[in-house]
Image: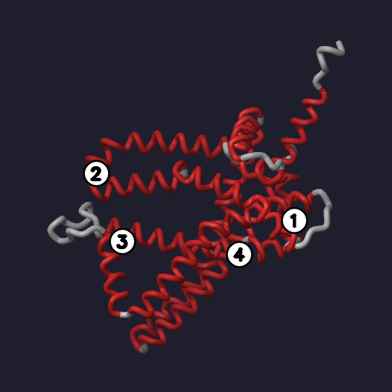
């Protein structure tokens, strides 16, 4: 399999089809960035307010209870704004659960058809996303428990709630779960592609993906290493691109916050929105590129196995 050709072709497809980024990548990237930022902020706050950092006498409430009390007090004092905020949060949460799944199905189908030279439109992508949505949603709900994010979250919960000694006692369990989760993630690499492109049921797609990964493990391992290197390089470039403007603008915002508080908040909000937009756009570009790489890899490997199976002589003919 020609690894460099797949990566080169995927990047060319990303550059030549910018509509894929705007239609099916930017919005999910914005949601993921917002939710990831809130999740990280909560984890930092929970760790900072936990007995591991502060004495139990200083803080008897958990981070979740503290945030819940603040929210309840805010809604009680401002019922109109509170209800509106709850509705907005519910809508954002619903989109966060469903939109990435929908766009994933659309991107896989569109990328595969573009590679085959077929004429497609973004409206077609909406139809493709709806066609495979229910099966992809079922699959994503199924594997949420085995995701490394869920396991790391539980490990941090044990650490900040019961201390280092309890974490060391139960830590090996989380290590085992994490290894199992990584293995399952590797085996299920092509499950979504079997669901979308081969129109297979969820459990059948899981079995087919596992078999393909086991048979072609050397190709897939090499592609994973290449994608890891590319990901690290893109993350470094993105951090540098965001750090330079931050270093220039941060002193201005800091000065404004001391002199004019309202102006500082407004400037900070504008900078945050601009940073969110550019971050989401770069993440969207990489997402389409990565989807292209794995879609092309899936098509190459399945075509290779189909060709190999046709070359096997039939025992009845010999």
Compared with 20, 81 (above or below) is below
Query: Dot 3, crowdedness within 10 Å: few (<14), some or many (≥20)?
Result: some
Of pointers 4 and 1, the one earlier in the residue sequence: 1
The residue under label 4 is: 26
Residue that carries the numbered disc 2 in the rendered image:
164
Given the current orientation, which residue lies at the most extreme top position?
318
* Label 4 to label 3: alpha-carbon separation: 28 Å
x 45%, y 82%: residue? 267
The x and y percentages for residue 20 are 70, 61
- Residue 167, can we see it? yes
Q: Position of residue 206 (x, y in %)?
A: 59, 36
Query: In the rendered structure, which disc, 2 or 3, sits on the residue that comes first in sequence?
Result: 3
The answer to whether mark 4 and mark 3 are in CB contact below 8 A is: no
Cα separation, mark 2 vs mark 3, equals: 18 Å
Residue 218 appears in view? no
Q: Secondary structure at mark 2?
A: helix
């Amino acid at each position: 399999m020609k690894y460099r050709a797949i990566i080169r072709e995927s990047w060319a497809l990303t550059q030549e089809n910018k509509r894929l980024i705007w239609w099916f990548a930017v919005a999910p990237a914005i949601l993921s960035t917002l939710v990831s930022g809130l999740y990280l902020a909560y984890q930092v706050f929970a760790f900072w307010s936990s007995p591991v950092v502060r004495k139990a006498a200083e803080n008897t409430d958990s981070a979740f209870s503290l945030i819940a009390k603040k929210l309840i007090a805010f809604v009680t004092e401002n019922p109109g704004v509170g209800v509106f905020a709850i509705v907005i949060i519910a809508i954002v949460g619903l989109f966060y659960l469903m939109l990435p799944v929908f766009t994933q199905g659309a991107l896989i189908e569109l990328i595969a058809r573009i590679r085959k030279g077929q004429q497609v439109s973004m409206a077609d992508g909406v139809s493709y996303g709806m066609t495979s949505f229910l099966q992809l949603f079922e699959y994503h709900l199924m594997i949420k428990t085995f995701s490394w994010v869920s396991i790391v979250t539980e490990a941090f919960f044990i650490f900040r709630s019961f201390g280092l000694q309890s974490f060391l006692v139960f830590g090996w369990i989380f290590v085992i779960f994490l290894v199992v989760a990584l293995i399952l993630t590797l085996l299920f690499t092509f499950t979504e592609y079997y669901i979308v492109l081969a129109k297979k049921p969820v459990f059948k797609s899981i079995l087919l993906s596992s078999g393909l990964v086991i048979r072609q493990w050397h190709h897939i391992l090499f592609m994973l290493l290449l994608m890891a290197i590319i990901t690290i390089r893109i993350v470094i470039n993105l951090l540098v691109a965001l750090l330079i403007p931050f270093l220039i603008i941060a002193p201005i915002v800091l000065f404004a916050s001391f002199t004019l508080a309202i102006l500082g908040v407004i400037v900070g909000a504008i900078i945050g929105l601009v940073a969110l937009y550019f971050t989401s756009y770069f993440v969207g570009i990489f997402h389409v590129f990565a989807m292209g790489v794995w879609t092309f890899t899936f098509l190459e490997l399945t075509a290779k196995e189909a060709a190999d199976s046709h070359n096997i002589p039939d025992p009845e003919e010999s």
